[in-house]
Image: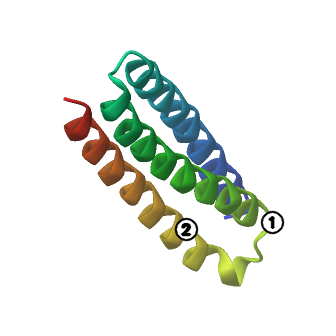
Amino acid sequence: MEDAPKQYADKLEDQMREWTNRITELKTQADRASAEKKIGMLNQIAVLNEHKDRLLAMVEDLRQAPDEDWDRLRKAAEKEVADIDDKYRDALAFFH
């Protein structure tokens, strides 16, 4: 079990890199949008970044968590990943 928290944290970091790339793509699209549409797009991007930042903090918590906190933190991180995915879908719908 000792390697499980590190492996899970590494997996989350990989996912965060993917979210960063996706958010960057959305930002590029927002930069090309009309001023009015751009405001809404940037708001969507800000929400995604907030979730990503929370997940980043969770990764650090997971790396340092004692065994008794591991499962609770893992579940919280999984919920945050699902939330980011939902918000990303919302952003895509707004962008198109």
Regarding mark 1 in the picture, which secondary structure is present there? helix
Q: Is residue 1 above or below residue 86?
A: below
Snapshot quadrant of residue 70: bottom right
List x then y, in percent, for residue 91. 31, 41
Q: Relative to 60, say whether 26 is above or below.
A: above
* Image quarter (top left, top right, bottom left or bottom right) of the C terminus: top left
Label located before the other in sequence (2 or 1): 1
Relative to residue 32, is residue 84 depicted above or below?
below
To which residue does mark 1 refer?
64
Given residues 26 and 1, the one toward you in this image is 26
Instruction: Using the image, tell me which numbered label, if any, was put on residue 46.
Output: none
Which quadrant of the figure has residue 41?
top left
Q: Is residue 1 left or right of residue 34?
A: right
Give the residue number, with chain letter if any, for mark 2. 74
Residue located 49% across and 71% down the image: 75
Across and down, in percent, residue 54 comes to 61, 60
**Helix, strand or loop at disc 2?**
helix
Q: Where's residue 46, x and y in %?
A: 51, 47
Q: Quadrant of the N terminus?
A: bottom right
Which amino acid does the dot numbered 2 rest on?
Arg
The answer to whether 73 is drawn above or below residue 84 in the figure is below
Nearest to the observer: residue 43 or residue 47: 43
- The residue drawn where x is 38% and y is 20% is 29
Identify the residue at image location x=63%, y=53%.
53
Q: Position of residue 19 (x, y in %)?
A: 49, 36
Distance between mark 2 and mark 1 Cα atoms: 12 Å
Name the residue rendered at 45%, 20% in the picture. Answer: 31
What's the colour scheme? rainbow
Tell me the amino acid under the disc marked 1: Gln
| In front of the other: 13 or 41 | 41
